[in-house]
Structure formats: C-alpha cells, structure tokens
Image (tube, helix red, strand yellow):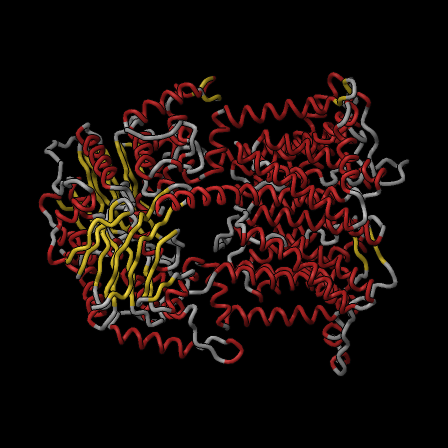
C-alpha cells in the first residue's frame, strides 16, 4: 500500500518540477502559475464541482481501461466506444423526447449500449477470427471517429448550425444539477461502486483478475476464458459508452465536432498510473481533471498555455510507473545490501 | 598442482533478504574435475554465477591465477578462458548449430558481411577436434537435447576456454547418454581443461570427479577427494542428517480402472506425431510413473488430459467418462493436477495466497459463493485457507500476502493441498518435486503415497528416475510420442528404463 | 494514363511514411523490443522538421531537427524501458501522449497558433529529377521526380534487408529478439543491441515524420500522424518484420490512401474514404490471423 502512495507522491512531485522547469524556461513564474491552477480547480464549491464534473469521462474511461487491462483483454478502444455511446445517446435523445424521469435512464442505457456494441465488434473479431483486439480496437477508434464525423455532417446534421453538429437533445435528457454539483458525478460514482463490487466481490470478478494475472492457471482452474472475454469487453465498452452519454447529457447537449476530445486516451493513462486499481483510478482521475480544469483558467491569468497540462500528464505517467517498478527493485536491493554488510562484518 | 581459481569469503544476498552464498571460500586446481554438490537451494548455481560474472557478489574476493578479478559480465569471463553451460540450455532454436556457436565471435568479410563459409569450417574443425557428433548445418530445434548440450559446450571451446562450468548437465540426459558425456569431459580434463561440475546426483558425481565440495544453505561443508568418500557420507553432509534412500512404499492392493487413455494421438501440422496411439490404464490405489527425456510427448499428454489441447485422435477416460468431450471445468471434477511450473500453471505469483488457494473450489464447491454462485463468500474462503495451511504445514505470514513470498516448498505444499482437497478420483502430477529442497521432496512423496493408500489413482510424470523408483508401482517409458515400455517397478532397473528412454521400443 | 500515373505516385507518397516507420519498427521488432512509440516519434519529427526548416530556411536543417526530435523521444524510451526496466507497452503509450502534448504545446508557444501552422518561410524537402530517366515513357514520371525522402526510403529498405540477413550485426540483432539470455552469454549484451535498434528506429521515423510535414505538404497540424504509426506497427506484425514484406504492405496501404482520395471524385463522403486504410488494416489482420502466424514475444 505504501509503495503505491510513495510512487504517486514522487510522480506528482517530479511532474510538477518538470512542468515548472518548462515554465521557467519560457519566462513564466511557476509558483503563481501552479497556484492559479489549483485554486481554480479545487478551491471552493464551484471550482471543485467543475473539476468533479470534468473528471467523469476521465474516470469512467479509466475504469474501462483498468478493468480490461487487469483482466487480460487489451481494450484500447475507449475513444471509439465513447463516441459511439455519445452518438447513440444523442440520437435517442433527439428522436425520443421523454420526460426527465424516463429520459435520463434511457439515454444512459443508450450510451451503454452504444459503447458495448462497438467493443462487441472487436470482441467478435477476436473470438471468431483470432484477430488481436489490441490492433482491432485501435483501428475501430479511427473508424468510429470518421463515422461519427460523417453522421453529424450529413444525415443528422443540424442544418441551421455553422459547423457540423446534431440537433440538441430534448430537455428531459439534460443532466440535472444538484446545487453546484452535476448529477453526472453521482452516476459516475454509482458506476464506480458497481465496478468495484463486481471486480472484487463477485465470482466473475475473481475469475477476471486471475485470468489477467495468469491465464493458463485460470483456464486450468476451470474458468471459462471465452465467456469471460466477452463479458469483460462488453462491460468495459459499456463504461466508455456511458462516459460518452454523460459528456453529451451534461455538456453541450448535442453531438458536436471533437466531442470525444482526448478523454479516453487520458483515461487510459490514468488507468496506467493507477496500475489498474479502481480506487487509484478515481483518485488520479480527479487529479488530472483538476490539472485540466485549472489549466484553462491558469492560461487566462498567467498566459501559460493550457496545453502544458498534456505534457504534465505524460511526464506524470512515466515517472509514476518507473518509480513504482524501480522502487521495488531499489528498496529490495537496499535491504539486500544491508544484510550482506551484516554478514561480512 | 597450483590453484587456478580461488574464491575467498564470497557473499551474495538476493534482494530482499535471501542469503544465497554465505562467506564461501573454495579453490579449484588446473586440470581437475571438481564437483560442487548440494540439494536444491544450497547455493551451488549461485556460487558459479558469481564466478562467471552473471550475478555481482556483495563482498569477498575472486582470484584467477593469483590475480584478484571481478567479471562484470560473462563476456569478460570468457575472455579469461572461463565458460559456463547452464542448466536451462539457452540456445537460439531458430538458428543453426554453426550460427549458435559463432554468435558473438563471428568471422566477417567486408562491410560487416558474415563469412558463412569460414564460420562453418571453423565449427566443423572444432567438432572434429573434440570428437563431438554434430552437424554444423542442423537447426538447433531439430537436434536432441543431449546434442544441444554439446553445442553449448562447443560454443565455449570455440572461444578457447580452459575452464568449463557445467550446471546440472545430466538432468536432461538419459542414463545411456551420461557415460558418453563423462567420457568427453574426462578427455577434456586429460587435455588440460578444468571442469567445474554442479550437481545434486551423488552417484554421478562420485563416478566423474577428482574432488567434491559439499554446500549446504549457502555455506561450504567440506571439500573431499572423490575416492575417499561415499554416497551416504555426502548425503549426510548435504542435508545435515541421515537420508533414507530406500522406498517407503508398502504393499497395497489395486482396485478398479480409474484412468484410461485409448489410442491417444496428437499430430502436429507438419505431420510429426507428438502422441502416437498412447494407451494405458491407472487403477485405484496405484501410482503409475511416466519416465522419458523431456520432449517425447509428456507435455502433450498432460495437455490432452487437462484439456489445454485437443488430441487428433483417441480419447481419455476417467471413471468411464470421456474427458475429450468435457470442458476443463467438468474435467476438474474428476482430475486434480499439480504441475512442475508453480508460477506457470499452478498459481498466479502476484495473487494473494487466498486467491490462489480457492481456485477451482470457487466453482465446484457451493460453500464458497452466495446467490447461486454470483458473489464469493470470503469468510468461507478464509476458513478454507486456514484449514489447508494447517493440514499441509504451509508456513505463511498471512492469507493476503503475495503467493510469491512463500518459499518454493511452501508454494508447492499449498498447491498440493488445494488439489488434494478436490474430491477427485484421479491425480495427475508433472515433475512435482522439481527444484524443491530435500525436506519438501520427502513431504510430497509422503502425500503421494498417502493418496495411493486412500485408493486414489495417481499418474506421476517425472524426469527423476530415482523418484520414480522410490514411489511408483509401475513405470511407463515415453519415447517419441509412444509408450515404449510398461514395467513393474519392482521388476526393473534404472539401466533398463534408461535403455527404453534412449531407444524406445527398439530396446526390448 | 495520367490518372494511372497519378494513382501510382499517390500510392508511393502514401506508402513512404508508413514504410519508414515500419522499417524502424522492424528493427526494434527483430531486437525483441515491444515498441509502439513510432506514432510519437513521427509526430515529434514532423513538428521539429517544420521548426528547423522555418528557423533556418533550409530543408536540411529541417531534416536534422526532425531526426533530433525523434531521437529525443527514443532517448526517453531507452532511459525508462532499458535502464529502469519500465514496461515497454506503458512507456510507448505514455511517449505517444507526451509527443502529442509537447508538439501541441510548442505549436502554441512557438508559432502562436492552434491547429495548423503554415508559412512561406518553410522550405520543403525537394523532389529529385533524374536526367534521362525522366524521359522514359510511363516509368519516367513515376521513378523520377519523387521527393528525396522517397528515394531514401527505398535505399533504407535495401540497407535494412542487407543488414538484418547478411551481416554479423544482423545475426546478433535477431538473436536479441529470439533469446536475449543466449546472446548475453555469447558476450554481446542484448540490452545494448536493443538500445541501438531504438536509435535506428528514431532516425527512420525522423525521416518519415519529416516527409509528412515537409514532403508533399509544408505545414504542421496537430496530431498530423493520424494513426500512421499504428498502421506501421500492424505492417511489422503482418510480415514478421521482413523489410521487403514491409515495403509491399506499405505500398498496399499507400494505395488505399490514394484510393480514398480517388473515391472522393465519385461523391463518396470524405469520411468514408478516410476510413479506407484502417479498414484495409483490419482486412489484412484478418488474413494474418487466419493463417495463424506469429512469433517472438510480441504478445498480442
């Protein structure tokens, strides 16, 4: 437990130091820049609520990646699954206007179904033809991107809009706010709780974890690898699709160009930082959301370009992973050296 | 004869706290065959790796021809004329014999172009000089294990090493091939080479060596002349107490047929018959052993029984049910399995001890789950692990520690316990005592005999003939995918089994 | 006739960046490195190529900067995955994102634009016209007049084939991938070979990235590699790394790239034509999977 914490702390410290160095080289003042960044994202109910809302797609795609990686399948298709979920939720939201009590669950279900459908394609290609889901999900990302771009520019385009986008979804589908906090945060937390429970307490989750750690052992132990593969792909696709639905319902309320942004790749990185742990994914998700939320405001105040957030994230993931893996080696080596000195004394 | 190599007070601690070599001092003379014996885990391999530069040592001194040296990588050792052949033969199976031999010291033409003709000629020259029986153009994955070992030795001789370190070389040879290897080693010694021979097989070591050093728990116990000692004395030094070499097996009547393989076959895509019409039976209350050099079909047999691979023909039955029609889970109701590879097939190293212990039980035993198998009952699981640990004397810190924190012996005991507690009539074991210390080996053998006395049927695949003779009622020999012989253990000898291992049915 | 020539030259242009990245990927593949950072290396190269060319008004500077940018990324990869033994998959993904973040950030910082940067001051890598050859009917306009980097890519293919299969270094390179422990005990450190293969990959990706931004267009756009690094990874796996096989596959993808543009003339929506190379990759993967090929630790 403490090693996870240690590598996280070191990672954050180094990343902030590197970011600070870059800022200094560009002639900016790091302390006030970071101050602005964290103040704008965490200080006060308003900023905190925004940060939490922004963390929703990051955490959900992060959970998708975490569960997949920890269980074996290399699902890198969250970007495509997210936009498919978003498109599904958007279309249902436009063409099936319902009152809020019914619309919200329906649209969430549509997002889940959209994401699961797209990951299901990858799962099918793997199970039926042996095509590696690693490459397939990557290709499907690009195809999904182009497909949704076409969908919002041709058949479902809002003719009155200046750039490609769909009509807005009916009001019933808009995610309500509870005070300053968006309800999408509650949905995300509920989903995270369900994922935790399934992964750590259900028999299926036990089999997924064992399969991810040693698939031959799990197979020999009687686990149904094929059925578990389908389940994992569909569940993780559903999570990414849910993220897409929430982005639409809690944000622009329509499918606009660039909706998916970099959420899913950030989510994958978060999963890696968290070493596929569920709690870690949530923590890092909030942290990255804070950096991203604060970065925009920081730019307004201090002129440091907000893109530095991306650089920080990449450095963060590299240092965290390296520290985590190296820390074990390093601490073990220290212990060994101490013992050896004791012998020859 | 002067000391060629002298080791002084070497210490090696493997992180975090495994004291592998504990202030070892020993010296080797030029032109001798010097064996280092000890049980698994005594530190003999590690000691040689320290000398060879594969692993850095923490303190102490190594002197080579009087000069204090420390090799930082094997390349430096080789440059000084010291070469090591590892227990796990590390050749590049996709390359040919000559490519493996010259790798790292290749003759070249202009522009770095590999000079194939000169290389093949040089390798052929060495083969003839040392009278090895090898074809330089053969692909390594097409030659026998004994031949591959020769290639490893040749690699070193090509680089003109004068000191050869061999780590458990006879583990992969049949009884017939061993004298051949020994003859070659003696020839090398007579030509001025020094041989350092690591082994835990006392009969061989006594037949081959000039001097023997015994190691136990990382320290040296004694260095003696081979002619001045015997097997019991060496064993006692190795283990610290008297070791029993006779079998504990008692008479036990065998019951009905529990396991039957009928014409089991597995043909590879290129036509090679990995399993060739294998048929045999195992009865309740009986232990049947499968002997054979690794790679003669044992692996495929295990896979076919467990369901990891489909046979091309034939079938496997347990208590009359045809396994080939069943899923792996269904098979596990009938078959318990202990593999040679604890971290490979037997468990997940990074999982907790609890997680590894409940595998298969989580599916077959309703007490472990709530709600029709949906949610795991962790309290029941914890009770189970506690009972398992108590019954099988597994020493562990806590149920949630990582499986790999257990010692090799405790890991195997946990796996054994887990499999034994499955209510199955048939037990398949594949090299279950490989790499274990003597105490654990004795324990596992005791459990195997207990299974038999409880009327279960046991099939024991093993490369250790001594183990087979200690424990089994019958021995089958596999050779090139066929059952070459079916012998009653009491009525056969190591030599006879060895002949079948080497020649197959032709030996009868 | 001109349409056909256009299709073929389009195919060659589309193939070149993939070919270069895939050759780099092949070298690391042979060495046993699980390298998925080609995308990031090419993107860095594309940006720095524009930077160098813009600052020094010279395409040569652009090429040099491109290779340096790509090498910088490789250096980080080497530091983390060879020195610190961090998981190669994770390192690769992180570096791809790092490249995306860094190039986008620098685009804002240095050129003060978002999205795309272009300028008359950027000097593109020239096309080479070969006298006499260019007059040969049909073949002439295809073989002559191609961008310098295209010729370099062809040379690189030949050089890699020779290196991997005929030289002493190639024997060691492949050995590092087959069995690193064996190579180590032969006295040649596999980790050194792997480091060298990553550096070579960076140089090749450097050329590939430079071709994207200084070759047939002269601009840098955010994320302009658009998944080509992933396609080159697929190419490496499909032919088990063989350079000649890679050249053929790259031409195939280049063809589909050009086909996409061609189909736009037939009122097929541009988004669908853009999908073509990726669908082609899936189809190729299907064929590959059916034939049950695969080797060497690339756990896919």
Quadrant for residue C78, please give it. bottom right
Q: Position of residue B17 (x, y in %)?
A: 39, 41
Relative to A200, A336 lies left or right: left
Relative to A65, A226 lies left or right: left
Quadrant for residue A276, please give it. top right
Asked whether C2 or C258 is in front, the reply is C258
Q: Which residue is depicted at the point 66% across and 49% down?
A: C96
Q: Position of residue B323 (x, y in %)?
A: 32, 36
Q: Quadrant of the N terminus of chain B?
A: bottom left
Asked whether A64 or A266 is in front, the reply is A266
Answer yes or no: is residue C128 visible.
yes
Task: Using the image, determine if residue C280 lies above or below residue B381.
Answer: below
Task: Using the image, determine if residue B175 lies above or below residue A197.
Answer: below
Q: Which residue is depicted at the point 25% across and 44% down?
A: B461
Q: Position of residue B84 (x, y in %)?
A: 33, 61
Answer yes or no: is residue C27 visible.
no
Residue that extends furthest to the front in the rendered view of this protein: A345
Task: Using the image, determine if residue A313 lies above or below residue C125.
Answer: above
Q: Position of residue A280 (x, y in %)?
A: 60, 32
- Number of labels in the image equals 0
Relative to B30, A178 lies left or right: right
Asked whether B22 or B133 is in front, the reply is B22
Q: Quadrant of the C terminus of chain B?
A: bottom left
């Amino acid at each position: 437990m403490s090693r996870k914490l240690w590598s996280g702390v070191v990672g954050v410290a180094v990343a902030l130091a590197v970011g600070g160095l870059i800022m200094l080289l560009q002639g900016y003042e790091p302390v006030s820049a970071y101050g602005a960044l964290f103040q704008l994202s965490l200080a006060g109910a308003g900023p905190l609520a925004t940060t939490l809302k922004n963390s929703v797609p990051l955490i959900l795609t992060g959970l998708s990646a975490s569960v997949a990686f920890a269980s074996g399948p290399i699902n890198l298709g969250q970007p495509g699954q997210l936009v498919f979920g978003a498109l599904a939720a958007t279309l249902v939201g436009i063409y099936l206007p319902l009152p809020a009590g019914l619309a919200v669950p329906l649209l969430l279900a549509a997002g889940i179904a959209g994401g699961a459908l797209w990951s299901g394609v990858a799962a099918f290609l793997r199970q039926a033809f042996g095509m590696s889901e690693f490459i397939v999900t990557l290709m499907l990302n690009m195809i999904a991107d182009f497909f949704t771009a076409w969908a919002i520019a041709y058949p479902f385009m809002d003719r009155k809009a200046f750039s490609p986008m769909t009509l807005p979804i009916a009001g019933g589908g808009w995610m309500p706010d509870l005070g300053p906090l968006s309800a999408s945060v509650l949905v995300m937390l509920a989903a995270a709780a369900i994922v935790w429970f399934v992964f750590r307490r259900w028999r299926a989750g036990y089999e997924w974890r064992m399969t991810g750690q040693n698939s031959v052992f799990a197979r020999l132990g009687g686990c149904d690898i094929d059925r578990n593969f389908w389940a994992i792909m569909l569940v993780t696709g559903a999570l990414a699709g849910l993220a897409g639905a929430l982005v639409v319902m809690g944000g622009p309320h329509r499918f606009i160009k660039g909706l998916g942004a970099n959420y899913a790749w950030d989510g994958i990185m978060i999963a890696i930082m968290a070493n596929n742990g569920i709690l870690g994914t949530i923590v890092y998700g909030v942290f990255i959301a804070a950096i991203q939320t604060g970065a925009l405001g920081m730019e307004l105040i201090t002129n440091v370009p907000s893109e530095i957030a991306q650089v920080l994230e990449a450095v963060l993931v590299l240092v965290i992973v390296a520290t985590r893996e190296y820390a074990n080696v390093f601490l073990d080596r220290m212990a060994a050296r101490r013992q050896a000195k004791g012998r020859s004394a | 004869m002067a000391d060629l190599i002298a080791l002084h007070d070497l210490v090696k601690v493997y992180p975090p706290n495994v004291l592998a070599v504990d202030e070892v001092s020993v010296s080797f003379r030029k032109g001798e065959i010097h064996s280092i014996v000890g049980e698994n885990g005594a530190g003999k391999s590690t000691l040689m790796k320290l000398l060879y530069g594969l692993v850095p040592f923490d303190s102490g001194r190594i002197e080579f021809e009087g000069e204090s040296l420390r090799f930082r990588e094997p390349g430096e050792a080789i440059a000084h004329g010291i070469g090591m052949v590892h227990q796990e033969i590390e050749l590049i199976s996709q390359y040919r014999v000559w490519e493996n031999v010259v790798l790292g010291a290749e003759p070249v033409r202009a522009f770095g172009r590999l000079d194939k003709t000169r290389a093949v000629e040089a390798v052929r020259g060495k083969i003839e000089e040392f009278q090895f029986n090898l074809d330089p153009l053969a692909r390594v994955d097409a030659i026998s294990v004994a031949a591959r070992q020769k290639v490893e030795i040749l690699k070193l001789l090509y680089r003109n090493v004068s000191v050869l370190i061999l780590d458990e070389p006879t583990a992969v040879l049949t009884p017939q091939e061993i004298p051949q290897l020994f003859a070659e080693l003696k020839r090398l010694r007579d030509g001025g080479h020094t041989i350092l021979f690591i082994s835990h097989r006392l009969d061989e070591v006594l037949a081959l060596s000039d001097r023997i050093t015994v190691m136990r728990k990382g320290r040296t116990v004694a260095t003696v002349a081979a002619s001045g000692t015997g097997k019991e004395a060496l064993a006692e030094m190795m283990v610290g107490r008297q070791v029993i070499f006779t079998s504990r097996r008692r008479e036990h009547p065998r019951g009905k047929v529990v396991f039957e393989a009928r014409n089991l076959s597995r043909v590879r895509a290129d036509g090679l018959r990995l399993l060739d019409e294998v048929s045999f039976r195992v009865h309740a209350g009986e232990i049947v052993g499968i002997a054979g050099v690794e790679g003669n079909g044992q692996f495929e047999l295990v896979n076919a029984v467990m369901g990891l691979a489909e046979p091309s023909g034939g079938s496997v039955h347990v208590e009359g049910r045809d396994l080939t029609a069943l899923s792996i889970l269904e098979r596990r109701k009938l078959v318990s399995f202990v593999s040679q590879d604890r971290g490979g097939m037997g468990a997940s190293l990074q999982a907790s001890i609890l997680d590894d212990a409940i595998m298969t039980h989580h599916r077959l035993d309703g007490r472990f789950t709530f709600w029709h198998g949906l949610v795991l009952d962790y309290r029941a699981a914890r009770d189970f692990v506690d009972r398992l640990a108590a019954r099988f004397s597994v020493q562990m810190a806590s149920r949630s520690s990582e499986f790999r924190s257990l010692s090799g012996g405790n890991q195997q005991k946990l796996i054994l316990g887990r499999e034994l507690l499955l209510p199955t009539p048939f037990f398949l074991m594949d090299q279950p005592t490989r790499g274990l210390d003597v105490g654990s080996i004795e324990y596992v053998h005791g459990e195997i005999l207990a299974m038999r006395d409880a009327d279960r049927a046991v099939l024991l695949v093993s490369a250790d003939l001594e183990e087979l003779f200690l424990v089994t009622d019958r021995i089958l020999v596999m050779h090139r995918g066929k059952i070459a012989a079916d012998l009653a253990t009491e009525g056969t000898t190591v030599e006879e089994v060895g002949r079948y291992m080497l020649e197959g049915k032709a030996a009868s | 006739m001109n349409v056909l020539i256009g299709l073929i030259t389009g195919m060659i242009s589309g193939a070149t960046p993939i070919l270069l990245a895939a050759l780099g990927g092949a070298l690391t593949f042979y060495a046993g490195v699980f390298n998925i950072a080609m995308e990031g290396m090419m993107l860095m190269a594309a940006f720095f190529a524009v930077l160098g060319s813009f600052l020094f008004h010279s395409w040569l500077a652009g090429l040099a900067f491109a290779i340096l940018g790509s090498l910088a990324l490789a250096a980080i990869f080497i530091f983390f995955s060879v020195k610190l033994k961090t998981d190669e998959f994770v390192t690769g993904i992180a570096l791809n994102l790092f490249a995306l973040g860094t190039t986008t950030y620098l685009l804002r910082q240095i050129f003060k634009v978002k999205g795309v940067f272009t300028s008359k001051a950027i000097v593109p890598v020239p096309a080479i016209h070969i006298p006499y050859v260019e007059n040969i009917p049909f073949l002439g306009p295809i073989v002559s007049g191609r961008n310098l980097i295209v010729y370099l890519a062809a040379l690189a293919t030949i050089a890699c084939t020779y290196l991997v299969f005929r030289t002493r270094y190639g024997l060691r390179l492949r050995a590092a991938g087959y069995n690193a422990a064996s190579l180590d005990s032969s006295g040649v450190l596999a980790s050194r070979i792997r480091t060298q293969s990553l550096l070579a990959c960076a140089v090749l990706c450097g050329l590939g990235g430079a071709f994207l931004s200084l070759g047939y267009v002269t601009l840098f756009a955010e994320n302009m590699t658009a998944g080509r690094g992933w396609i080159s990874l697929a190419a490496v796996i499909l032919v088990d790394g063989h350079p000649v096989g890679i050249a053929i596959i790259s031409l195939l993808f280049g063809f589909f790239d050009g086909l996409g543009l061609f189909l736009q003339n037939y009122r097929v929506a541009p988004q669908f034509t853009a999908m073509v190379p990726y669908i082609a990759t899936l189809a190729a993967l299907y064929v590959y999977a059916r034939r049950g090929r695969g080797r060497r630790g690339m756990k896919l």
